Image (cartoon, helix red, strand yellow):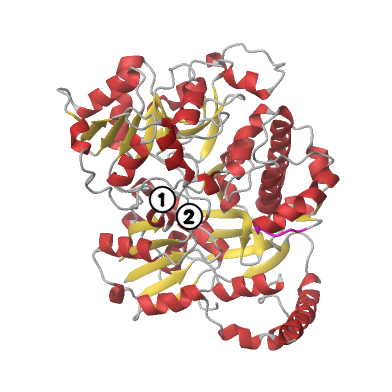
């Protein structure tokens, strides 16, 4: 039961997160990626 | 300052590099120690080896730099998208995950109690390693691979003070994955087998380009996105193959099936698509920056044929293809990136030693081996050159081992390219691999442009070049199948020249590799040819050998005639039965398809 709930939550979470980042897609994405060494 | 780079979080090829006071001391892949091809385990053996070479203890390490962002990588695997590009809500919902340390981080903290942990974006690791391997003061870079955290390709700029990525292609479903799934489709499912497809391509015609183009959507600047994304897991790709077959309207090849012309044609088609997209990407990069220098890096840069095309098209005046394009040396880029970020790197102090950054072979400890010692009355290189000229095959082990997939003369098998049928003989009796696969020529740099159309060094075997037209024999063009084409003599040295007259060169300069240079000079004196076959000292599926004992083990189980370890020469006892050899080979089977 717990495993099923975990899986459902993951699917919902993935949808929320993906929806957000997919808006920015379409080939080359322009960005200014900093060469940082701190963030994991 | 002692900086240790650590790569392998992406699930393959864990590796370690050590820089002490701005000097590269050592770099090693874990697979060479565990003997598991592309081993992804925490590289404790490689760490110990690098520390031993540097003569320091784990407590002396000041900084450990990961070649990837571990959390970004973990997040991408979980959700198929980037944490960095997630919204405020996305980050809020997953904030607890952010503190979850990966296994590599936990181990690194245990092993290096005094070290600060730093994290390099994967594509920056590639780009910085390429930059410091080149002579460029400044350059654009094009990094293309399967995935680095979230992106499958990046474009950016680097000079001695800064490095930035200005564009990337998100998702791990781009050009690298396309090549990988087609490799599986062609019956080459083991990790890193794309080079086999590249090797098969010249035997075919690119008649299935349009079929392959139905697999993806194309965007500006050579960017592609697969319509259906199976990911990189072999089982998922296997499940994906029937869909692929239907879409391509072509049959799947089982690894056990015989290779036929259709497979060469599919290979030629994916290679043509790949090259087309790489050239478009390079054009796109050229539009972004005013520089004339391009660094081509990432796993896809190991496709030396496309690197050769990139060089010949002159989109950028100068191209440098990374010596270790894949992830086998990602730790070196990570460590150099830290140096780059903290006050820059004194390039005069960098000594790549031709990328011979691993440990020495050590002494041969096999009992009875000395019974097979040869003590010639002439100088070593003269003896080796004489034996090579007589058609003998020599395994050569000396000094620090090479970093990356290519043997460059430290753990090599050498042979005479003038010997008829040497290509198929070596493939079938020594390397135990597909007969179609060509070998690379090692050539004296001063003679290179007498033989090949190339105007720059290829000292790490990173470029292909074409044999001069005047050295080519007339050959028919209408072969019924690629095997006929394979055996047809196309020039004086067909074993190192592909059917399209291309060759993956290693140019040997006296300063880079004095011993190899001397050997080639002696060989040229005898034969008039400044070229030797150079292939890695291993069999199909086996990591390149590291120690003297491993060298002996491989030597006696193959048909190599002589083994040279430093200045000692051994003749092969040839006392293994065919069955014993087959039994020995079985241990590498699962990595060899």
Which residue does the numbered mark 2 point to in the structure image?
A: B328
Magenta residues: mostly which secondary structure? loop
Q: Position of residue B542 (x, y in %)?
A: 45, 46
Asked which quadrant contains residue B155, the reply is bottom right
**Earlier residue among tags 1 and 2:** 2
* Residue B303 falls left or right of residue B569: right
Is residue B287 something one can see in this rendering? no
Marks 1 & 2, CB-CB < 8 Å contact: yes
- Dot 1: what SS? loop
The crowd level at tag 1 (other Cα within 10 Å; few <14, some 14-19, many 20+) is: many
Q: Position of residue B231 (x, y in %)?
A: 70, 60
What residue range appears in magenta?
Answer: B229-233
Q: Which mark is residue B403?
A: 1
Q: What chain does mark 1 sit on?
A: B
* Residue B49 falls left or right of residue B220: left
> Is residue B255 positioned above or below B131 on the image?
above
Asked which quadrant contains residue B539, the reply is top left
Q: Which mark is residue B192?
A: none
């Amino acid at each position: 039961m717990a495993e099923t709930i975990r899986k459902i939550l993951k699917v919902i979470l993935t949808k929320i997160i993906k929806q957000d980042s997919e808006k920015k897609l379409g080939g080359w994405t322009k960005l200014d990626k900093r060469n940082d060494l701190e963030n994991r | 300052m002692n900086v240790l780079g650590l790569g392998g979080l992406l699930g393959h090829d864990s590796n370690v590099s050590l820089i002490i006071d701005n000097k590269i001391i050592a770099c090693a892949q874990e697979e060479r120690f565990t003997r598991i091809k592309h081993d992804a385990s925490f590289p404790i053996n490689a760490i110990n080896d690098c520390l031993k070479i540097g003569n320091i203890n784990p407590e002396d390490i000041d900084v450990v730099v990961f070649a990837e962002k571990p959390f970004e990588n973990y997040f991408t695997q979980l959700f198929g998208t980037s944490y960095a590009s997630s919204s405020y809500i996305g980050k809020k919902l997953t904030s607890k995950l952010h503190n979850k340390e990966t296994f590599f981080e936990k181990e690194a903290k245990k092993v290096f109690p005094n070290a600060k942990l730093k994290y390099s974006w994967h594509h920056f690791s590639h780009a910085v390693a390429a930059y410091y391997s080149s002579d460029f003061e400044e350059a654009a870079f094009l990094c293309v691979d399967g995935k680095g955290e979230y992106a499958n390709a990046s474009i950016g700029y680097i000079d001695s003070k800064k490095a930035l990525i200005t564009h990337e292609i998100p998702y791990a479903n781009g050009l690298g994955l396309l090549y990988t799934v087609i490799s599986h489709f062609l019956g080459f499912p083991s990790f890193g087998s794309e080079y086999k497809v590249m090797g098969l391509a010249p035997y075919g015609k690119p008649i299935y380009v349009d079929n392959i183009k139905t697999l993806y959507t194309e965007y500006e600047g050579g960017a592609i996105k697969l319509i259906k994304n199976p990911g990189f897991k072999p089982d998922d790709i296997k499940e994906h193959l029937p869909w692929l077959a239907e879409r391509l309207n072509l049959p799947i090849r089982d690894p056990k099936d015989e290779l036929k012309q259709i497979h060469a044609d599919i290979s030629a088609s994916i290679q043509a698509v790949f090259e087309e997209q790489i050239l478009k990407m390079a054009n796109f990069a050229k539009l972004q920056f005013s520089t004339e220098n391009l660094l081509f890096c990432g796993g896809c840069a190991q496709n030396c044929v496309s690197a050769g095309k990139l060089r010949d098209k002159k989109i950028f005046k100068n191209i440098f293809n990374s010596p270790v394009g894949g992830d086998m040396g990602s730790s070196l880029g990570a460590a150099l990136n830290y140096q780059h970020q903290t006050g820059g790197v004194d390039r005069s102090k960098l000594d790549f030693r031709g990328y011979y950054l691993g440990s020495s072979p050590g002494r041969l400890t096999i009992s009875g081996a000395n019974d097979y010692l040869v003590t010639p009355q002439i100088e070593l290189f003269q003896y080796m050159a004489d034996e090579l000229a007589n058609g003998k095959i020599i395994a050569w082990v000396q000094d620090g081992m090479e970093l990356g997939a290519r043997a460059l003369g430290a753990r090599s098998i050498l042979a005479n390219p003038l010997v008829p049928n040497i290509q198929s003989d070596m493939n079938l009796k020594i390397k135990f691999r597909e007969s179609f696969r060509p070998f690379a020529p090692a050539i004296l740099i001063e003679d290179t442009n007498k033989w090949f159309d190339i105007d720059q060094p290829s000292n790490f075997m990173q470029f292909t070049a074409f044999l001069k037209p005047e050295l080519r024999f007339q050959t028919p063009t209408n072969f019924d199948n690629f095997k006929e084409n394979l055996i047809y003599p196309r020039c004086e040295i067909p074993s190192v020249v592909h059917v399209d007259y291309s060759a993956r060169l290693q140019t040997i300069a006296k300063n880079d590799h004095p011993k190899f240079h001397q050997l080639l000079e002696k060989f040229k004196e005898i034969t008039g040819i400044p070229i030797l076959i150079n292939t890695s000292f291993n069999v199909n599926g086996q990591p390149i050998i590291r120690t003297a004992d491993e060298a002996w083990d491989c030597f006696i189980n193959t048909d190599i005639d002589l083994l040279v370890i430093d200045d000692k020469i051994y003749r092969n006892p040839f006392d293994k039965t065919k069955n014993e050899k087959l039994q020995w080979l079985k241990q590498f089977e699962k990595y060899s398809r």
